[in-house]
């Protein structure tokens, strides 16, 4: 009897923590409420639930089961969210892939997560078709969204899901998620070793991230959230889209960022909240005042993803874009946040810990650092990732005794406000995208005439930070900047390319032989 009761409670728990169930509940409670507005198409909660149902049925029809990976490489579009919801309902693992990557990088992702199904947009055909998709083992099915030449080996997602319109997937405890600790998403984040790592994110993590975002954004049923950040990122998917579905609010979804369109839709749809990286705010400020629309409906403008400057905060406030700051990472989503007033009271702060997490600073001995001492930000609680996919070594290096080590260095004042002091690794953020120098260095070192290379992040007025490569040329060889950057073609996404190359005869090094990157600048 006790075991049976636990079984029932477990089933109820995962149901309440499952995003697909939230959409189903809102479809029952407020069926005509707009859930998504995309390019003038309004999708109500009833329609969204129906779309998720038909997508679930199609996935089941082609043999997708609990635990199977479904990789998705799409621009922001309703189909992206349909698949996210359908996988959550079935217990399949959703794998969003950065559409800015090259075919070399895509090959790594596919080889690592081994999806049963790969879905891509027709705009990425060149990258996708550069790979021999039929060569992967185990065999992988492929589908596409958009216009494409008919292919008997490739599914047309929109056409296929329409065949199941009005039908619902058949689920049992063995066919759907039954435990909140089961994987929901594998989201890739580059590592300091240069190899991307797949953070395994559970249903429980998504639920508690939504609770944190609910508090951070002060979310309400009547809110309208503008999303132009890529949904393949934690910011778009877990900080914006998922919490909006939790509250039964409305998403206005943009395929990509367009500053004029942002202004237009804020006025048109009375947008109340949105999230953007500082690069976005810089572009919005560049729009001439005569071309801006009424943005008085805005209640919260959130900023995160890279370093913020006091000057940017001041200019945004003057333009009616006063924002609150958020800091996090893929492995945890939101960790710290600061209100609109906090930077004025505490210049330079990145805020205090979110409500549903234990965030601390550890010194180099693993003890809690005293106020003012610099140490590593660590986190414990339900917002932690479960592990790195197929990488127990990196998992053990990151999660120690139940505590996740972020790699970010900071200090905390007497009032509990955090101040970033750097990163334990060398990562920098360019236009909201994490760039790990080790990955770039690994590619550049493939050039036969490059003896050594060190890449560091440098300030940039547009992107926040960009890469600066320092290169030692092999004896007798001659290279210029174009020769070095040519190595990036087809191997690295454009945002990872260094924008500046400096040639050196030697590097300053520590007693252990490590490059002192700070001394290069």
Image: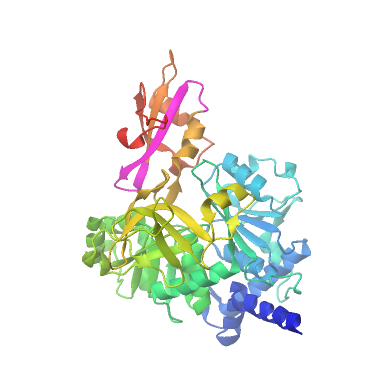
Residue drawn 31% across the image and 70% down it: 339
Expressed as whole percent of the image width and height from the top left, the position of residue 159 reads 69, 63
Q: In this picture, which residue range is highlighted in magenta?
A: 446-466
Front residue of 277 and 162: 277
> Is residue 29 shown in magenta?
no
Expressed as whole percent of the image width and height from the top left, the position of residue 124 reads 58, 48
Q: Residue furthest bottom?
A: 29
Expressed as whole percent of the image width and height from the top left, the position of residue 202 reads 59, 65
Examine the rendered structure and indicate whether residue 357 appears above or below residue 428.
Answer: below
Quarter of the N terminus within the rendering: bottom right
Examine the rendered structure and indicate whether residue 144 appears above or below residue 494.
Answer: below
Examine the rendered structure and indicate whether residue 434 appears above or below residue 223.
Answer: above
> Residue 169, located in which quarter of the rendered image?
bottom right
Front residue of 488 and 508: 508
Q: Residue furthest top?
A: 476
Residue drawn 62% across the image and 71% down it: 180
Quarter of the C terminus within the rendering: top left
Examine the rendered structure and indicate whether residue 224 appears above or below residue 109.
Answer: below
Expressed as whole percent of the image width and height from the top left, the position of residue 309 reads 26, 55
Front residue of 106 and 412: 412
Front residue of 363 and 251: 363
Question: Is residue 518 toward the left or the right of residue 47 in the image?
Answer: left
Q: Looking at the image, how many numbered discs can be counted on the residues?
A: 0
Coloration mode? rainbow
> Is residue 451 shown in magenta?
yes
Residue 298 visible from this viewpoint: no
Main secondary structure along the magenta-highlighted residues: strand
Residue drawn 69% across the image and 72% down it: 178
Residue drawn 43% across the image and 38% down it: 497
Residue 281 visible from this viewpoint: yes
């Amino acid at each position: 009897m006790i075991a049976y009761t636990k079984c029932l409670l477990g089933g109820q728990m995962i149901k309440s923590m499952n995003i697909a169930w939230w959409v189903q509940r809102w479809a029952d409670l407020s069926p005509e409420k707009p859930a998504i507005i995309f390019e003038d198409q309004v999708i109500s909660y009833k329609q969204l639930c129906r779309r998720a149902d038909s997508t679930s049925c199609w996935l089941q029809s082609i043999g997708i089961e609990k635990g199977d990976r479904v990789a998705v490489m799409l621009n922001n579009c309703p189909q992206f969210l349909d698949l996210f919801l359908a996988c959550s309902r079935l217990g399949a693992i959703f794998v969003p892939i950065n559409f800015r990557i090259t075919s070399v990088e895509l090959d790594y992702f596919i080889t690592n997560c081994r999806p049963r199904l790969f879905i891509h947009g027709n705009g990425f055909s060149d990258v996708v078709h550069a790979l021999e998709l039929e060569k992967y083992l185990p065999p992988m099915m492929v589908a596409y969204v958009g216009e494409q030449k008919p292919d008997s080996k490739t599914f047309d997602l929109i056409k296929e899901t329409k065949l199941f319109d009005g039908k619902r997937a058949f689920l049992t405890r063995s066919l759907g998620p039954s435990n909140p600790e089961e994987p929901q998403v594998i989201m890739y984040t580059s590592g300091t070793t240069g190899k991307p790592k797949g953070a395994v994110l559970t249903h429980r993590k998504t639920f508690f991230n939504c609770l944190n975002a609910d508090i951070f954004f002060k979310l309400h049923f009547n809110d309208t959230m503008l999303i132009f950040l890529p949904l393949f990122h934690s910011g778009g998917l877990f900080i914006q889209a998922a919490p909006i579905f939790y509250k039964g609010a409305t998403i206005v979804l943009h395929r990509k960022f367009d500053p004029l369109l942002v202004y237009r839709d804020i006025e048109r749809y009375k947008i109340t909240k949105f999230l953007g990286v500082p690069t976005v705010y810089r572009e919005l400020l560049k729009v001439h005042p005569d071309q801006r629309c009424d943005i008085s409906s805005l209640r919260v403008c959130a900023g995160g993803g890279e370093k913020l400057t006091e000057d940017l905060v001041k200019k945004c406030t003057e333009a009616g874009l006063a924002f609150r700051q958020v800091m996090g990472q893929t492995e945890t989503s939101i960790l710290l946040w600061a209100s609109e007033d906090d930077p004025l009271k505490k210049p330079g702060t990145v805020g205090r810990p979110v409500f549903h997490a234990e965030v601390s600073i550890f010194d180099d001995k693993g003890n809690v650092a005293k106020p003012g001492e610099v140490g590593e930000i660590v986190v414990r609680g339900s917002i932690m990732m479960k592990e790195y996919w197929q990488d127990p070594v990196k998992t053990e290096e990151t999660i120690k005794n139940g505590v996740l080590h972020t790699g970010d260095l900071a200090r905390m004042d007497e009032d509990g406000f955090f101040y970033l002091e750097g990163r334990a690794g060398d990562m920098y953020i360019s236009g909201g995208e994490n760039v790990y120098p080790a990955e770039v260095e690994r590619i550049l070192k493939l050039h036969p005439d490059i003896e050594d290379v060190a890449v560091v992040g440098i300030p940039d007025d547009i992107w926040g930070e960009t890469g600066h490569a320092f290169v030692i040329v092999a004896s007798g060889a001659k290279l210029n900047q174009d020769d070095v950057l040519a190595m990036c073609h087809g191997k690295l996404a454009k945002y990872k390319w260094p924008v500046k190359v400096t040639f050196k005869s030697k590097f300053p090094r520590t007693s252990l032989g490590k490059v002192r990157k700070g001394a290069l600048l």
